[in-house]
Amino acid sequence: MTETASSAQQPTSRPVLVSPHERAAPLYTVAQLRELEAHSAAHLPDNTLMGRAGAAAAHCLLELAAHDGSLASGRPVWLAAGPGNNGGDALVCAAALREAGVAVEVCMPADVKPDDARRALAAARLAGVPIFHVPPSSLDAYSWVVDGLFGIGLARPLEGIFAELAHQIASRAGQAGRVLALDVPSGLDSDTGNIVGGITAAAARASHTVTFIGAKPGLYMTHGRDLAGALWIAPLGVDAAAVPMSSPVAVLNAPALFTAAFPPRAFASHKGTFGSLAVVGGDTGMCGAPILAARAALHAGAGKVHVAFIGAGAPAYDPPHPELMLHSLDTLPLDTMDALAVGCGMGRTERAADVLAEVLAIDVPKLVDADALNLLAAEPHLAQALAQHGTTHCACVLTPHPLEAARLLGCDAAAVQRDRLAAARTLAGRFGAVVVVKGAGTVIAAPDGRAAVNPTGNAALASGGTGDVLGGIIGAFLAQKLPPYEAALAGVYLHGLAADTLTGDGAGPAGLTAGELAVAVRTSLNRLIYPARD
């Protein structure tokens, strides 16, 4: 599918479709999108944005079908049109497809209400588009299914015939694919990625989504990626930079945000050039977690990697990676390190709390993860020490999963998941640290208000130890003098990209182990940051 660099688009020109892949695309809330729509509508003839949206949807479907030959059989395209503007987009799309010689059928259970959508309905009828009020019993007879029921701003759960249609569309996507959602899959909260009304409520699922004006955070978080499938952006000729409004709520994490922060790899480099990292953790019986983190740090380019065990019974060396230097904590001067990664397997004992207090007092960049986060939540004096450190140094990265984030915030994990961006921003402000809220659509937030949502990664990361690997990667980048925000962006992106690459090679999503990620991270790091030069 092609894309152009121009944002200007006349209603009769070929629609512009932009892939957000590897782009730091801005993510807009519903409120911001309404501002953009209103500003654009005030400077355009009536029905222009809907006309462009429907044309872009038709163009997207035709481009996709051209690649897989799905329209060659002559089977019609079935479109579900809701009562609002999303339904109007579907009607414009149907008319455009029919004019392109594609057989179409529209299911419109209730008449569209907005003026623009009513004009689209009249135009569709004039074009000879068949419109039915009752859905078919099965969608098997159709080449493509288009979800145009509800777009952004849905305020209540889908009910009645609309819930039934959403279930039918979702079933089609799961069985045969070839479902195109317009703007967002119906039932998805485009700000948060949750299903409107909760996990048991109805929502459509798509194999592909063409989203209008700009990307939405909910398409990349929580249930968004599962429901939206492959994503394309149709800007509709809207120039967001020309509209006086607040900045995007976040951006998509992408290499452009962090590649410039990496140190050069000059011929005259030595191991000290790329920093010394100490991974602090590993209470008795829990040595595996810090070793996983340390191995990942080696593969992420740290010059020297130490492991400081706080418990007894630690191994003398790591046979697969004797490059690692293993110590009892008492024998390693942590204040001589360039960065620290603390928490992996450290437990929650009084000894662990004392070690965390010692680490927080050391003035070097640090990664705080796992049990260290739980100690922060349980011990107010530790949380206060971290917050005080953040106000003066701001060189910490916290990497909680939703439950750990909830403990730090004094709420439950469901509250974190209801608004992952808000949770990450709140924690970043509270502790003066960069915060990485892990999960589907990992959020990276900085105390200065910057935030990103990560697009890489998949279910292969849902196994023990992958969080320790992420901690080691970010710790290695801190040791190489990357600023905390850029270190977190790079670590999260490359960690997810490793899972995507391995899954593409058949090693996932089922059965991928945490230890397999490090080598794939090294490969991606060198391809993105240090590509071979002729």
Image (cartoon, rainbow, N blue to C red):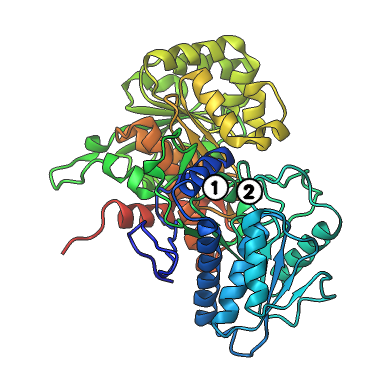
Residue for point 74% across, 55% down: 203
Give x and y (percent) for residue 338. 32, 27
Is residue 45 visible in the rendered image? The answer is yes
Q: Tag 1's secondary structure?
A: loop
Upstream in the sequence, badge 1 or badge 2?
Answer: 2
Q: Amino acid at mark 2?
A: Ile
Q: Tag 2's secondary structure?
A: loop
- Residue 152 circle label: 2
Q: Quadrant of residue 333?
A: top left
Spatial CA span between label 1 and label 2: 9 Å
Relative side of 166 to 26, left or right: right
Residue for point 32% across, 54% down: 528
Asked if the residue under mark 2 is in contact with the one under mark 1, i.e. CB atoms within 8 Å, the reply is yes
Give x and y (percent) for residue 186. 69, 55
Quarter of the rendering occupied by the C terminus: bottom left
Q: Quadrant of residue 297?
A: top left
Relative side of 269 to 233, left or right: left
Question: Looking at the image, is mark 1 or mark 2 nearer the viewer?
Answer: 2
The correct choice, above or below, for 180 with respect to 514 in the image is: below
Q: Amino acid at mark 1?
A: Lys
Instruction: Give the residue number, with chain letter if any, for mark 1.
Output: 216
The correct choice, above or below, for 214 with respect to 5 in the image is: above
The correct choice, above or below, for 255 with respect to 342 in the image is: below
